[in-house]
């Protein structure tokens, strides 16, 4: 039974740091949903860098099983990027679905996973959050400092908490936000 | 932010050069020279801030030089490159100790800003340019660094930036068991082992922003934590007390630092450092094995909470053997230090991890080596 960790985030990285752990950590901490800390602590979020995308896909089913077994409100989030070989989040999600099927994960179990997919790393999101615009067909500028990623994450959390529609949000961010909202609705006490 | 450090003839550091980014993790076997690197940077900081003198007998003074035992030279050389508020600084200091019975002395010192010389010193004294362009100078005690002795103004006003940068550099090797139970005076900076944590708290807590930052982060770690209090425990002596909710509306529980576990005291120290960085009291932090005594679930949250503060002005360099820190830092942020044998110098290179393994596992197997 899980005691404290409520969200396990599998992500691409550490090699090449495809997905910035500081972004994930700051975003979820700032969102601080009330259901996240029925029993509080500093490690309600656990980030597990998995290496490349194939390793991430491979690890997802076993990690989902562990999270489901842990019970309580333990949730699995998967952070990755579509790169050039997946047109969008749905297409990449199918790859995870296939691996889940192969490992005997039911559709209901699979639907518990929260997928967050950027188009190409997180740079386009950060560029959008810093400047209000980005073009996901081109790679965003490299983010050199963790503080920039953290500030962008805080901005995204504030947008999310504000609940107001945002113009020109990059498609991959819209897709991911939709998944977070669905997850959030599911977790709210009824 | 320290961008480069060079040391020669300091213990196992011989013509040693390392460059740093805003975040870094140094790993390698015991005896590789990781802590010596921190001690060398610490020596430069101690002298350049004026905190210690060469050959003195005070707590912070450097009585004797620790020369490389297989070299004949009696001169240690250090160079520190730093970036601060858009400027690139370089600080050079050479120290000599001719014989064990003689006191060491500074034989050369120089500081540059964006390639332009701010001052130069040798055995004759310190020289710099006056505001009107004329050369000027003064003799200076050989035991004392000129960087700490010069009042920055006029043409050398930028020296203030360099002085501030080195004064906000912390080099720490936390040992919670060393933390003193009471404080007799304020301390503007922590000592290496954080033993004067109570005294450092007394200084920092005068800044409300710092106190708030510390309380907010500790309340995430310990949801029942409420506040700190400095309690009089004798003539001029104060002890730090923590207050915790006792639950169900009862009276808060008060505990002195000494009543907490080693790990809990260690965590308070680490989050005090974080609050210092968040509020500008520290800019660059070199931490040697911060993971000692700290519970596994607390490591990632602390490292990530530090990393979210890092930018061109704020820097964190860790030494660690802990697989959690080593693996999460990975190749991108990791550097590997090694020596070929006990009479060979320290070398530094990228951390190269075999495909499909975590860095921690690769190091544990001995599959990471110097290249």
Image (cartoon, coloured by chain):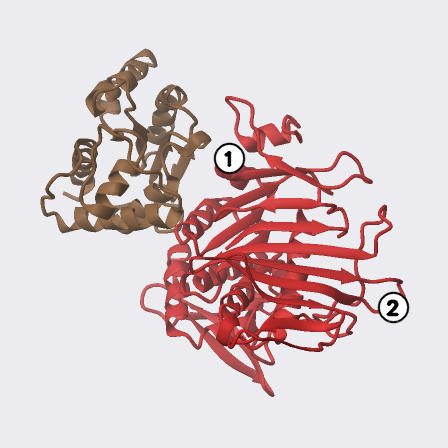
Name above or below for residue A88 compared with residue B169: above
What residue sits right under mark 1 in the picture? Answer: B330
Upstream in sequence: badge 2 or badge 1: 2
Q: Nearer the viewer, residue B186 or B57?
A: B57
Q: Nearer the viewer, residue B243 or B292?
A: B292
Q: Nearer the viewer, residue B30 or A109?
A: B30
Who's red, chain-wise? B
Residue at coordinates 22% horizontally, 19% vertically from top-left? Answer: A91
- Give residue B355's mark: none
Secondary structure of the residue carrying tag 1 is helix
Give residue A130's position: percent from left, percent from top.
24, 47
Who's brown, chain-wise? A
Choose top left, top right, bottom left or bottom right for residue B61. Answer: bottom right
What residue sits right under mark 2 in the picture? Answer: B102
Give residue B305's position: percent from left, percent from top.
41, 51
Q: Residue furthest top?
A: A102
User: Seen in the image, is B238 located left or right of residue A104?
Assistant: right
Whether residue B50 appears in this view of the structure is no
In the rendered image, the quadrant that contains the C terminus of chain B is: top right
Secondary structure of the residue carrying tag 2 is loop
Residue at mark 2: chain: B
- Count residues near mark 2 (Cα–Cα under 10 Å), then give few for <14, some for 14-19, many for 20+: few
User: Seen in the image, is A143 located left or right of residue B336?
Assistant: left
Q: Are marks 2 and 1 on the same chain?
A: yes
User: Seen in the image, is B190 located left or right of residue B125?
Assistant: left
Residue at mark 1: chain: B
Q: Mark 2 touching mark 1, by CB under 8 A?
A: no
């Amino acid at each position: 039974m899980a005691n404290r960790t409520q969200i396990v985030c599998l992500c691409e990285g550490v090699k090449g740091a495809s997905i910035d752990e500081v972004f994930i950590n700051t975003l979820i901490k700032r969102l601080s949903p009330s259901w996240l800390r029925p029993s509080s602590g500093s490690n309600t979020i656990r980030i597990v860098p998995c290496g490349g995308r194939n390793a991430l896909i491979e690890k997802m089913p076993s990690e989902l099983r562990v999270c489901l077994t842990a019970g309580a409100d333990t949730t699995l989030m998967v952070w990755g990027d579509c790169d050039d070989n997946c047109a969008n989040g749905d297409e990449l999600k199918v790859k995870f679905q296939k691996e889940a099927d192969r490992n005997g994960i039911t559709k209901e179990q699979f639907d518990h996973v929260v997928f967050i997919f950027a188009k190409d790393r997180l740079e386009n999101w950060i560029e959008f959050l810093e400047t209000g615009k980005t073009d996901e067909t081109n790679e965003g500028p490299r983010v050199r400092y963790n503080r920039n990623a953290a500030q962008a994450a805080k901005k995204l959390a504030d947008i999310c908490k504000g609940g107001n529609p945002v113009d020109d949000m990059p498609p991959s961010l819209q897709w991911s936000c939709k998944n977070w909202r669905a997850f959030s609705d599911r977790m709210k006490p009824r | 932010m320290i961008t480069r450090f060079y040391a020669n003839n300091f213990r196992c550091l011989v013509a040693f050069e390392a460059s740093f980014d805003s975040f870094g993790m140094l790993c390698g076997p015991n005896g590789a020279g990781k802590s010596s690197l921190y001690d060398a940077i610490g020596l430069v900081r101690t002298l350049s801030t004026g905190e210690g003198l060469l050959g003195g007998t005070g707590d912070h003074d450097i009585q004797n030089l620790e020369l490389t035992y297989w070299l004949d030279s009696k001169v240690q050389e250090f160079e520190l490159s730093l970036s601060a508020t858009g400027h690139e600084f370089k600080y050079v200091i050479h120290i000599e100790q001719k014989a064990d019975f003689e006191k060491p002395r500074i034989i050369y010192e120089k500081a540059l800003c964006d390639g332009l010389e701010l001052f130069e010193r040798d055995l004759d004294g310190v020289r710099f340019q006056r505001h009107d362009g004329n050369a000027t100078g003064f003799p200076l005690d050989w035991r004392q660094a000129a960087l700490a002795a010069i009042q920055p103004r006029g043409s050398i006003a930028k020296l203030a930036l360099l002085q501030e940068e080195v004064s906000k550099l912390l080099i720490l090797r936390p040992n919670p068991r060393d933390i003193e139970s009471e404080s007799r005076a304020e301390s503007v900076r922590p000592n290496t082992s954080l033993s004067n944590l109570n005294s450092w708290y007394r200084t920092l807590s005068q800044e409300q922003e710092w106190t708030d930052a510390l309380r907010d982060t500790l309340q995430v770690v310990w949801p029942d934590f409420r506040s700190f209090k400095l309690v009089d425990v004798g003539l001029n002596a104060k002890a730090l007390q923590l207050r915790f909710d006792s639950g169900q509306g009862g009276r808060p529980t008060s505990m002195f630092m000494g009543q907490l576990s080693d790990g809990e005291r260690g965590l308070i120290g680490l989050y005090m450092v974080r609050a210092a960085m968040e509020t500008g009291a520290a800019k660059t932090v070199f931490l040697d094995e911060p993971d000692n005594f700290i519970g596994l679930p607390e490591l990632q949250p602390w490292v990530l909470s530090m990393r979210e503060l890092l930018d061109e002005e704020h820097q964190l360099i860790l030494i660690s053997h802990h697989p959690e820190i080593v693996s999460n830092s990975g190749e991108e942020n990791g550097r590997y230090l090694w020596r070929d044998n006990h009479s060979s110098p320290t070398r530094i290179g990228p951390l190269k991890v075999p495909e499909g393994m975590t860095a921690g596992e690769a190091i544990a197997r001995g599959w990471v080596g110097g290249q």
